[in-house]
Amino acid sequence: MSSQEYMNVWAIAEVEQGRLSPVSLELVAAARELADRMGERAEVVLLGHQVEDQAQELIRRGADLVYLADDPTLANYSTEGYLATLTALVEAHRPLVLLLGDTERGQDLAPRLAQRLGTGLIPGCTRLEMDLTEWLLLGTSPAYDDRLMITSSIPRGRPQMATLRPGAVEPFPPDDWRTGSVEKVSLEKVEPVAKIVKRGLEVPRQRLEEARVVVAGGRGMGGPGGFEMLRELAELLGGAVGASRGAVDEGWIGEEHWVGGAGGKAVKPDLYIACGISGAIQHYLGIKDSKYIVAINTDERAPIMDLGDVGIVGNVHEVVPALIEELKDRA
Ligand SMILES: Cc1cc2nc3c(=O)[nH]c(=O)nc-3n(C[C@H](O)[C@H](O)[C@H](O)COP(=O)(O)OP(=O)(O)OC[C@H]3O[C@@H](n4cnc5c(N)ncnc54)[C@H](O)[C@@H]3O)c2cc1C
């Protein structure tokens, strides 16, 4: 099949608790830019329940067309349900480029979808370009602790798939004058092999990767109780809670909070508060793009004290409650 039979750039939107996740708007912007360069259309797939309003928002943010599958069975993410509908849609419409978020959901879906479609995947991209001579997507992703940038393409398989890291692309501001269409699509019914019986995972109010403020704790928190006060501080600052691998390894907090450049999530908030974290290189690589880093540590020689912008020499069990009180007084 020649690549001419494949057209347009697709983005797969993500909805959480009825709202579009920020990465969805970034994916639309990336799809829009690639599509404009190719003279093609930016199309978005939106799966969920009672999400019609979000389809209009996607158009305001740059989509020409939204394929909308709205069904109660899509209210919660399930690998098989989403995979079956996406596979059928892609096979029917043949996009040339297919973008997903480099999020937990995207990382779950993208390789499976690529395998089903018999194509390749460029994971974890921070930059996407189009080679208009060969009609090839060029996806650039950092490797080896960000010391190397690797640009890859998928010369044979179609569609050309990539996952885009959250925060890599600026979303377009909403444009109420933009027009586009919404096409309702029917669902591929699948018999689930697994069923959600109970949700035990703490669902963060904000995605760590997208939070403007991150309050993170390490071994210096001394136990799971220490993270309760970090949650309170994060709540007061409208932020998310992160953790070093040290704290995750201790079992004090779930690994969905793990921050770092070597296995943990990379964050880039305006403010990162590192509480009882030594500042090992693997941790620092995940926070280095933060605008402002404040460290609280009893050891003034801890590496984080030099790596951050402000170092507070003190015990987290004294400094953090004092910060909480101060913020409460101001509220
Ligand atoms: C292959 C590999 C990949 C890794 N990837 C990651 C990664 O992605 N992310 C990551 O975080 N780590 C990663 N690590 C682990 C990393 O090397 C460190 O071991 C880890 O970050 C240490 O966690 P920590 O700072 O919480 O603990 P520690 O190094 O034990 O530091 C605890 C800090 O708390 C301070 N402290 C103690 N008590 C108090 C108190 N009451 N008040 C204030 N301060 C206090 C201490 O002075 C100390 O600086 C990786 C390691 C390897 C080998």
Image (cartoon, rainbow, N blue to C red):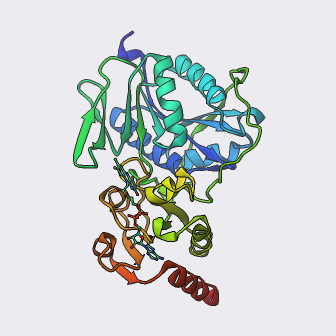
Q: Is residue 305 above or below residue 166?
A: below
Residue beneath the point at 36% across and 12% down: 2
Count of numbered labels shown in the rendering: 0
Left or right of 280 in this view: 185: right
Residue beneath the point at 44% across and 65% down: 269
Residue 138 location, quadrant: top left
User: Given the current orientation, which residue lies at the most extreme top position?
Assistant: 1
Residue 96 visible in image: yes
Identify which residue, 233 or 180, lies in the foreground.
Answer: 233
Q: Is residue 193 above or below residue 315?
A: above
Give the x, y percent position of residue 41: 46, 33
Give the x, y percent position of residue 27: 47, 43
Q: Quadrant of ligand 1?
A: bottom left
Identify which residue, 327 or 243, lies in the foreground.
Answer: 243
Left or right of 62 in this view: 136: left
Residue 155 location, quadrant: top left
Identify which residue, 101 or 31, lies in the foreground.
Answer: 101
Residue beneath the point at 61% across and 87% down: 325
Residue beneath the point at 40% across and 79% down: 298
Identify which residue, 188 or 25, lies in the foreground.
Answer: 188
Residue 12 visible in image: no
Give the x, y percent position of residue 163: 43, 37
Give the x, y percent position of residue 275: 46, 72
Q: Point out the image quarter for the C terminus.
A: bottom right
Q: Is residue 31 above or below residue 233?
A: above
Residue 84 location, quadrant: top right
Q: Point out the image quarter for the N terminus.
A: top left
Left or right of 79 in this view: 135: left
Q: Is residue 153 above or below residue 48?
A: above
